[in-house]
Amino acid sequence: MSSSVVTVVAPVNIAVIKYWGKRDEELILPLNDSVSATLDTSVMCAKTSVFASSNITCNEIWLNGKKESFSNKRLINCLDAIKSIAAKEKSVDDDFLSWNVRVCSVNNFPTAAGLASSAAGYACLVTALAKLYNLKSDVSCVARLGSGSACRSVYGGFVQWHAGTDPSGKDSVATQIAEASHWPEMRALILVVGDKAKKTSSTRGMNITAQTSELLKHRIQHCVPQRTTSIIQSIKERNFPKFAEITMKDSNQFHAVCMDSYPPFVYLTEVSHKIIEIIHKYNDLCGGIKVAYTFDAGPNACLYLLEEEVPKMISIIKHFFPSTTPDNLVTGLESTSELVSSDFL
Ligand code: DP6
């Protein structure tokens, strides 16, 4: 054999308890546990092919059709970690392990616009490499070395990333709380408000926050532990109002800690705030919580809601944002945790 190729598709995950702040930059160890739902790969995903050959003279990476440098430290860390597990497991022969790799990855959604592109990208890369080298071990802790949130995309359904306490990071891993089929009515509706790359990257933003925000300390000690326990319980009980309330409060607190950082940085736009207002008004009119919003490090909203609410929500969004066209709405609700995407730039 003189070459081998593997292609993998990995989904985006959207956190309901946000990861924000690291205790170790190099190993990407978080200050707090986080919880997310992994979305269906049919609408938002990364697709990565890895090719190993004795004929490739140096490692190469192509992102969305453009050749990039392989000098990125996180990328090298992931490849090295996978190769060192392969050497330990003796899963491939030494010759194969010594070959260089060519990585080609594409996202079917805006990169670096706060839509968890790095999570899907690194989860995909690491899963593809693990297949290439025939690994048996769990690779969520290797995906974590690429981008913290990527470790959650290694699993489907509802996932917890345990912060862990070990300085080596061996217990900072993701585990599945429940499969998507446990809550088949759950849906995510992504509202693409902007597709520009964010001004403050997650890595830089959380660094500033960890160094300067008093509110972050309060969040980590007094809010996240209780919220994590409660939201896991709400998932197990399929208690939507409880799930939704915690999701919205945690998103709001995450954006508040960004404002509490020095210098502050803001990811939400006027449209994001309008969406927040609409959801609260809608829930008030319904006399109970029917829809939750959450925003990552960007202006785009992810709405969590039950299937029966989806058509109503889409009509409301179209009403308030008339430039939304049917072409911008990708609907397909037949499978579990299916995603609907709406673009109303
Ligand atoms: C707001 O995982 O992108 O989406 O570990 O520095 O690569 P790095 O950061 P990243 O941060 C994601 C932050 C978030 C919240 C979350 O997904 O939990």
Image: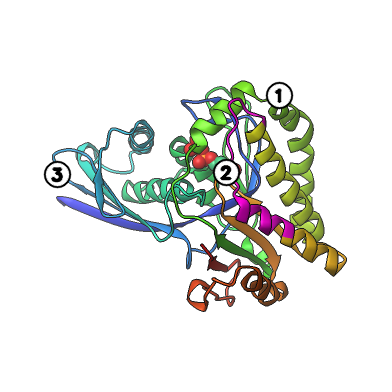
The first of marks 3 and 1 along the sequence is: 3
Q: Residue at x 59, y 40 (%)?
A: 266
Judged from the image, the secondary structure of the residue bearing numbered disc 1 is helix
Q: Residue 139: x, y in percent?
A: 46, 43
For disc 2, the marked residue is 267
The first of marks 2 and 3 along the sequence is: 3
Q: Residue 2: x, y in percent?
A: 14, 50
| 74, above or below 189, in the image | above
User: Which labelled disc corresponds to residue 214?
Assistant: 1
Front one among 322 and 211: 322
Label 3 to label 1: alpha-carbon separation? 53 Å
Amino acid type, mark 2: Tyr
Count how many numbered circles sit on residues in the image. 3
Splitting the image into four quadrants, where does ligand 1 fall?
top right
- CA neighbours of label 1 inside 10 A, class few (<14), some (14 to 19), many (20+): few
User: Which labelled disc corresponds to residue 54?
Assistant: 3
| 65, above or below 207, in the image | below
| 60, above or below 157, in the image | above
Q: Tags 3 and 1 in contact by the CB under 8 Å rule?
A: no
